[in-house]
Structure formats: C-alpha cells, structure tokens
Amino acid sequence: MIGDGAAGIASAVREGALRAVDVVAEALERIGRADPVLCAFLEVWAGEALRRAAEVDARVAAGERLPLAGVPIAVKGRHGLRTAGPLLAAGGVAVGATSVPGPDTPWQTWGLGAHGRTVNPWRADRTPGGSSAGAAVAVAAGLVPMATGTDGAGSVRIPAAWCSVVGLKVTGGRLPSPDRTGLAAPGVLTRTAADATAWWRVVRPAGAAEAPAVLPGSAVWSPDLGFARPGPEPVTLARSAAGRLAEAGVVRLVRPPAPPLLLDPAPAWTALRTPGADRSGAHRVRAGNNRRLDALFAGTDLLLTPTTPTAPHGHEGPGDVYSTALTWAFNVSGHPALSLPAGFGSDGCPAGLQLVAPHGREELLLAVAREAERRGAFG
C-alpha cells in the first residue's frame, strides 16, 4: 500500500478500496522492522496513529472528501506536530517524529534516532544528510510516502539529494516558520512529484495566486553559482539530469548573456544566524544577490544547479566541505527550490539536481518535476 504513494493511498481510502487503519498499521509494521537498522525515527506514535486512522475512516464514511485520507506522514523532530495541522485536517495520519541532529552535533549534521545514528538507506556507512535526516530516510526506504521538513540552509534539499527522493523548500515567508531569522522555510520530502504536489496544495496559503506553469520552461544551468567549488561527479550527474529534462521537452536550456555569478552567501548566512552580529555585510550580500537573481529571472523561468557539491560523506563528517554550498544562497534570498533525483555516482550513492524558481512559483517547480516524472527523466 505504501508503494502506491500518498496520492494513490488517499484515492483508495476515499473510494473505500482501503481502510486508513490498515494503511497505517502496515506503515507501523514496516517502521518496526526497518527502523532498528535505519534509525530514522525519534518516536513512533503507534496507538495515537491507529486512533487517528480510525477517525479518518469515520470521516470518509460520513462523506468527507479528504485530500490526504489515510496517508501515513512522518513529521520532522519532536515538535513537528506543531505545524502539521493542515495535513491532519486533510486526513493525513502522523505516525512518528523523524530524527534530527543530536545535541552538540557538529555542523556537518547527521541524524540521531531512537536506535542510534541515522544511516543512508543506499549505503549504511554514509550520512543521509541533514538536518531533515530521518525524514528523507523514512521516505526513501518506503516507510512512509511523505515526511515534513524544514530547510534553513539546505536541510530538505540535501537529504533529498543524498537519499534519491524529491525535496521541496517553499518561498521564504510564504508559510509560517518558527525561525526568527527568516532563513528557514517549511518543506516536504516524498518519493514522487505528485505527492509533493499533494502536500503543497494542502498547505499553501488560502487564495494564493500563481501564474499557470507553461512547459517547457526556459532554464539556465550553473555548475557552481560563480563561487562554489563542487566536485566533478556531482556536477556531471546533475548536468546529465538537466540534459534529460531538456531532451524530454520538460525544460528548454538557454545560454544567458553571462553565467550566473552570485556572491558567496556563507558570511551573510552566518551573520544572520548569530545573535548580536554585525549584519551590515549580510544585508549587502543579500541585496547584491537579489539584484542578480531578479535580473536572471527576468529572462528565464528556472535556474538549475547540482544540489550538493559532494557525494554523501561518512558519518565522521566531510572535513572542510560544506554540503550547503549550493543551497543556502536561496535561504538568504528566499527563492523556492526543489531537489530532483539525478542518478547515482561511482560509489553507489545518489545525487540531486536543484531547480530554483522566482518567488512564489512553487507550482512551476512542481509542474516541471511532475512532467519529468511522467516522461521518465528522473535520475
């Protein structure tokens, strides 16, 4: 049942072909078998989840057309339920809290679950990325079809890339976030673009207007945004994925008058995160990059980059290489971004292709992802 994805599960529960309690029971059974190895969950709420699933079945029997009827959902961290209200109202069932970095974890970020350190489902000696570590693992391993995340520097997109799932970060400020710096935005991790779309259409602001997505959209490729130093294999995999999107007619790659050259956001991000820091330089970087991105998006629909500069590293950490190098610019600027699976490297680990769109264009990102999925252009 989980293999049917969120959209398939909800449709079957609404039509009476499945019961929510059976779907959730299956998810709990899978978690019970797999999580001692994967360590994707901090807590599993079996009794409460089954109770809520029974409520969903009763609501469906009473005639409610619930968009996420009976869909098992994992929420990021122990506080994830605070922002899951719209998903539960739509018929989703929260089954547990996923792992995040443990106390005093270094900046490399890996997850710490109830059973130990969270492992990458493709290679247990590698990290799944973070900080939405358990969320990505739970989805990639088929324990749940949908998991919530938050993304303050790439915390949805990086684990999505390293676990070969879809990861969406929404426009900064478009949905409520407890992060007072404004850098962190809500997001979702799913196995399919259709499921990410289902999440967005439940949580998006009421009355939110967006221009219809017209495909193929024009897209500009950048391997490094002008400042990062990604390794050759992540660049090759992401560039090949961009080429597949173009060959499938999903995007139209265009050459801009000049390559995208952004200012390195690292000092600005750090200053914005540090209480009492002088933020004048951060504001200059943000304003400079905003001007450059405004100019870019005035002539194109999408910016494509590798999601990460490296393959998944070992649990001891990557040394001096920041996995956020290609993602955190769009937390500072607030642009929505999505990571698509881009294939596998020579070490057997996944890579991602990052798609960035103008502010408020989540539907464009999702339309491209859905069409890429439909045409078999995923990695």
Image (tube, rainbow, N blue to C red):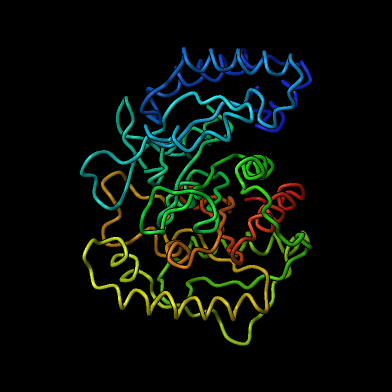
Q: In this view, does 328 lie to the left or right of 53?
A: left
Relative vertical location of residue 295 with respect to residue 341 in this rendering, above or below = below
Residue 13 in percent (x, y) is at: 72, 20
Residue 176 in percent (x, y) is at: 48, 48
Number of numbered labels in the structure image: 0
Quarter of the picture containing the N terminus is: top right
Q: Is residue 205 left or right of residue 330?
A: right
Q: Residue at x 41, y 58 (%)?
A: 182
Q: In which quarter of the image is residue 250?
A: bottom right
Residue 370 in percent (x, y) is at: 71, 49
Relative vertical location of residue 375 with respect to residue 254 in this rendering, above or below = above
Relative vertical location of residue 164 with respect to residue 63 in this rendering, above or below = below
Residue 223 in percent (x, y) is at: 52, 71
Q: Residue furthest bottom?
A: 257
Relative vertical location of residue 75 with respect to residue 238 in this rendering, above or below = above
Q: Which of 268 and 226 is in front in this view?
A: 268
Q: Residue furthest front?
A: 207
Q: Which residue is drawn at 41% across and 59% down?
A: 183
Q: In which quarter of the image is residue 153?
A: bottom left
Q: Which residue is drawn at 63% across and 26% down?
A: 91
